[in-house]
Image (spheres, rainbow, N blue to C red):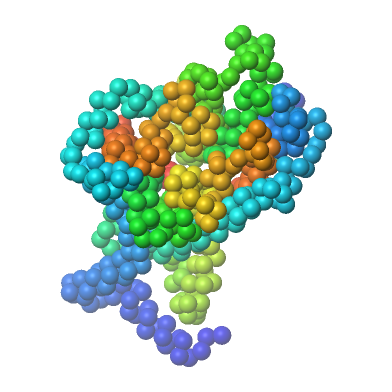
Amino acid sequence: MASNGKLTGKQRLGWTALTIVVMGYALFPVAAILATSFKTQADLGNASFLPSSLTWENYEMILFGDAQGLFLTAFRNSIGITLIATFIAVVLATLCAYAIARLNFPGKKIILGTALAVSIFPVISVVTPLFNLWRNIGLYDTWLGLIIPYLSLTLPISIWTLAAFFRQIPWDLEQAAQVDGATQWQAFRRAIVPLAMPGVFTTAIIAFFIAWNDFVYGISLTSTEAARPVPAALAFFTGSSQFEEPTGAISAAAIIVTIPVVVLVLLFQRQIVSGLTQGAVKG
Amino acid sequence: MTTAPETSRRQKREAAASHGRTADRKNGSGKKRTNRAKSEARLGWLIAGPAFFIMLAVTAYPIAQAIYDSLFSFRLTSPDDRSFVFLQNYMTILSDTGVFWSALGVTVLVTVVTVAVELVLGFGLALVMHKALLRIRGALRTAILVPYGIITVVSAFAWYYMFDINSGFVNSWFGWVPGIDSDLDWFANFGTAITVIMASEIWKTTPFIALLLLAGLAQVPDELVEASKVDGASWRQQMTRVILPNMKAAIMVAVLFRALDAFRIFDNVFIMTNGAAGTEVLSLLAYRTSIGRLEIGLGSAVSVILFACVLLICVIAIKFFKVDLASGTDAKGGK
């Protein structure tokens, strides 16, 4: 159909329209908050989409001004906690998925089933006992106190995605390389690692998105800037005075925390899509 | 490159473990195979175990604790007054006028509406991406991954500010629509508030459904579609007779995953209304009871009920709609 060769003028017009509609759907709310982030305090009430004049004052406020302490510490917390949780999850999930794809042992299905069950688990159901326990053992409001529960978000999807990836790797290559004279380690490193790395990398991106998005753990298990991540900090943002809505500052902060997402998506859209669909739909 | 010791090591290895099947056939002894299976099982659990036990530790333990706590009258504000009340908390919740049932109703409403809308929208998006030229396809996928990757709280604020009576532009843009004028406070009434909440939820999660359905579309054999075209099937017939039946599994999985996700909705409601105007959902009720008011016993009971609802949805989907979530677990290709 459309995929073979030249388009007629009419088809071209149709596809242009469709592309604009899809792009508009996907990007309009982002554009709206981007526009809001450049509005002056007075401009916020003028009920129009675009700012009447561009200002950087909202960005200055959260990066260098009064709200700096609030936003930058939360941003650092988010990045640190999310990266550590992602790293641990991907390392453990890689081992786990390797065993599932490569070895024959009883309990394989139990592990995959558990991962599935954990991924549908309502976070809110486990947060109260954790809240209680963390306060008793001193993990409340610490990085570690968030990293541990984040593993419940990142591990299951990592195991599923990686198991699906690893099943497609032609493991015989390893033996072929050995026949050709490579040692076992060489064979693994030269033949298998290059095939497995894209899967591991993709899984890391997806796990990062999920931990980056967390809100329930973030607001329940922290109380100060010591560990509060960005989504939770945004929810508790207050204006510089009680008569001022923090709309501009929140919008600017929202844009800054969206930049990493957009960069990852731009660079790795193909990998993300294959990772997302492989774990879930395997015919 | 290959040195002598390496070669001999390789030969030894080839003769032994890595070619297990040959070795088994040669030796033919059942005992050898059992030993091999045993050591493989041990190795398997050794490297898969840590992930498994961490998953259990961070979910099974807390849910067990929540079930236990839900049987006590227990407030953190007076920890010494803790007493065993058995099912009293559940009775209180279920018989309490309104609060719980209204939250359950709103949660079900949000789940049904968002999943239905997302299924239609997502299928449309999937069709567009499926048929698009490669050049456009990349751009489209990049665009729809933005809502997927964006933080839900950010999405909630974006939608909130669009509709907000002070800073929003929706009232002035859509002033010509009957019922919308500059005085309309979207977050003061249930109908309008829940609409915006669902819009944000739908915007953020439709890409996920679209990508799952796109994968499903790609699995429909081209020959079947071509054959139906040759036989003179209309576009509608191709859809309902060939394409949709062949991607039933993908649709079911997408619907179940999204339904379970929508049932746990929290972030959008928390940011936009915090439960005002009758928009309280189950997750928010649990949060406000336990973390907000520190009524651990009562809050745990709400959490357990929420968990039971999620399980129930799963059981219904698997038993009655035969959703095969484990279709990917079969390790056929592995060994």
In the picture, the quarter occupied by the C terminus of chain B is bottom left
Asked if residue A56 lies left or right of residue B224, the reply is right
Q: Quadrant of residue B318?
A: top left
Residue in the foreground of this view, choosing between A274 and B79: B79
- Which residue is at 58% across, 52% downward? A74
* x then y, percent, for residue A160: 41, 52
Residue in the foreground of this view, choosing between B98 and A156: B98
Q: Quadrant of residue B72?
A: top left
* x then y, percent, for residue A127: 38, 47
* x then y, percent, for residue A203: 50, 55
Q: Quadrant of residue B36?
A: bottom left
- Which residue is at 49% across, 24% downward? B194
Residue in the foreground of this view, choosing between B294 and B69: B294
- Which residue is at 20% across, 71% downward? B34
- Which residue is at 48% across, 45% downward? A219
Residue in the foreground of this view, choosing between B272 and A200: B272
* x then y, percent, for residue A9: 75, 25
Q: Is residue B325 visible?
A: no
Q: Residue furthest right?
A: A53
In the picture, the quarter occupied by the N terminus of chain B is bottom right
